[in-house]
Image: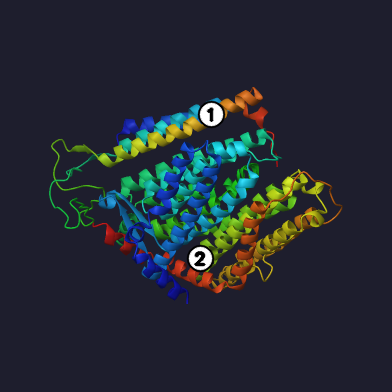
Amino acid sequence: MNFFIALLVSFLFGLGIYLILNRDIMKIAIGFGIMGHATNIFIVASGILQGEFVPIIITKINEYTTFIFGDDLASGIIAPIIEGTSEAGMYADPLTQALVLTAIVISFATTAVILTLIYHIDKEFETTDVNKLGRMKG
Amino acid sequence: MILQIASTIDNLLLSVPFIYNNVDVLPIAVPLLAGALMILFRHRIKFQKYLNLAVSIIILILAFLLITKVIVNGPSAYAVGEFGKYGIVLVADLLSSSMVLLTAFISLMCVIYSYEYIESESLNQSYYALFNLMIAGLNGIFLTGDIFNLYVFFEIMFLASIGLIFANEKLSSTLIEHKFEGAFKYLVLGMIGSTIMLIAIITTYGTIGSLNMADIALKISILNQEGRLPWQIVAAGLLFIIVFGNKAALFPLHYWLPDVHPTAPTPISAMLSGILIKVGVYGILRIVFLIYAPASSYYLPVLMLISLITIVVGAIGAIAQTDLKRMLAYSSISQIGYVFLGLSIGTAGSIAAAFVYMIFHAVAKSMLFLTAGGVIHHAETRDMTKMGGLIKTMPFYSAAFMIGAMSIAGIPPIAGFFSKMYLLKTGLEAGATIAVFIALITAFATIYYMFNSWISIFWGESLKNKRFHSSHEMMLPIAILCVFAILLGILCNPVFEAGDIVASQIIDPELYISTVLKVIPR
């Protein structure tokens, strides 16, 4: 992973956690949004690989299906890497990009739920401060 | 004899090839479809009610067919689409199919109970749809063989259960601010958990290059044999344990449970305490013994320490409570600690005991929550000190609560005794003497808090209250669960045999891996 991307991810995580530890529940929701972005960048960045193998299927059609899977433990390849050489020596794994779409949709849904909950809490109690909301002790 | 019956059913099923071939995916697909249909039919109240009942019964039948198929033919794998190991694979071994059966059974009971218990407006608007989505998520978690798909189903189940917490009861004794606070805690911890889970999944994928559980397990074991197990793998496994431990309310992350489970309406409390915390146990079984099996020597001692603290903390919390549903929720924490104790001892016998304990606890605890719902509606309060003398007005509920309390506390003829005895016995055989001693001492505390609450609810001065009349729809599921709690105790041998098979499949994941690799070419 690129050093600056790693730095960005860690910075965003720190910011998100700082906001989650806040008293205001609105800021907690924003913190979760930022932490979700940090995770998404982490996912995409983990798919950028360097080496002589590209994740594009060229040869070796499997007899059972028409897809090819060739990870080769003997030569130290344990990523979803298929034979063939890229020209620049750098490529992106397409599966992580498919994963990040799903992750974005799910974080969208959870953010919608938490914002709805905060809206109703604000309407009911007219405060968004955690300390004033804490009524259940023990 | 059970094998003969199973093979007869399996042969009958062969005549319907569509269901036979797709029985792995139908327990997920049917409730997903039903959840969408329920929203379309929300103005046709009667139709919606019977449709939901029919769907629940169909899922129970499908789960039954799935487990007979697994008993007869061994574990089965089902590739969704033709993407090989980069696609999604559903795997049904005996553990996951019995969890699906348990989910289907308990959820059918909760659905029948809901008709009378939940307020009609929220019942018709969103309750059925969310309930079916939650069932789809649960079945998906238990059946999937892909860790990212596990995350997706986990989120479906989690979001649906948040919606269900807000369903209103007919005679509510829960304040809305308690609901808000409980749901907010649940949501925040769940969101942190899902972020951590995503990081763990991506770390595993970036290191191993696969999302398929069996494939990851195989590659990690090969790397371990070559002596170059990457350190990130151990860390990723620990992150998964945090996520599932949060769901199962293990010690440092247990404090949300006594706020969330009691504020939910009673059938949902029964689902949360009966099934949803078992998701954590299932997840950790898969993480520790299948996926990250070579690193399990790091995890098991930590899990044992945490499980012992969980047992003690849950029992102390339960003793201190005067609120009936909070007492039951703390009892759930303590009991889940027993399950994790069996899991963390790590021998085949103790894992079998943990599995059986999990099933017996699900039956008994969901019955106790359903009974508590009737009691709370009758007494119009959740405070046990304000109740009393209910044995005269509701003898059926007092008997049911007694049976449930006996099962949780471990009094002989009821199911809970056998699982607890087997757990402690296998623990002693494995040499975990101190752990078993602590568990045994806490078992006395369990007896105290269960029977103390029974006495304070049903004995003493009687209340005069005529507003609530218990209907047959509420009594039927409690009666069925009672019968099962007693029958599972008397005829516990088949369950223990199933537990032994489950444990042998967990300890040696060779069968699981080879089943999956038959379907997905490498």
Q: Is residue A131 visible?
A: yes
Does residue A137 appear left or right of residue A23 in this picture? Answer: right
Q: Tell me if mark 1 has few (under 14), some (14-19) or many (20+) residues whose alpha carbon lies within 10 angstroms of its own.
A: few
Residue drawn at (62%, 53%) of the image: B333
Front in this rendered view, residue B497 or B478: B478
Question: Residue B289 falls in which quadrant of the image?
Answer: bottom left
Q: In this rendering, which labeled residue sits more in front, label 1 or label 2?
A: 1
Does residue A85 appear left or right of residue B17 in this picture? Answer: left
* Residue, far right: B461
* Residue, far top: A126
Q: Chain of mark 2?
A: B
Q: Is residue B297 visible?
A: no
Q: Position of residue B290 (x, y in %)?
A: 40, 59
Mark identifier at residue B351? 2
Q: Position of residue B135 (x, y in %)?
A: 49, 49
Residue drawn at (46%, 55%) of the image: B58
Q: Tell me if mark 2 has few (under 14), some (14-19) or many (20+) residues whose alpha carbon lies within 10 angstroms of its own.
A: many
* Residue, far bottom: B1
> Does residue A82 sit above or below B442 in this rendering?
above
Q: Which residue is mark 1?
A: A116
Q: Chain of mark 1?
A: A
Does residue B120 appear left or right of residue B382 in this picture? Answer: left
Q: Position of residue B268 (x, y in %)?
A: 59, 46
Does residue B345 appear left or right of residue B505 in this picture? Answer: right
Question: What's the distance in space between the residues labelled 1 and 2, CA to CA?
Answer: 42 Å
Amino acid bearing label 2: Ile
Amino acid bearing label 1: Thr
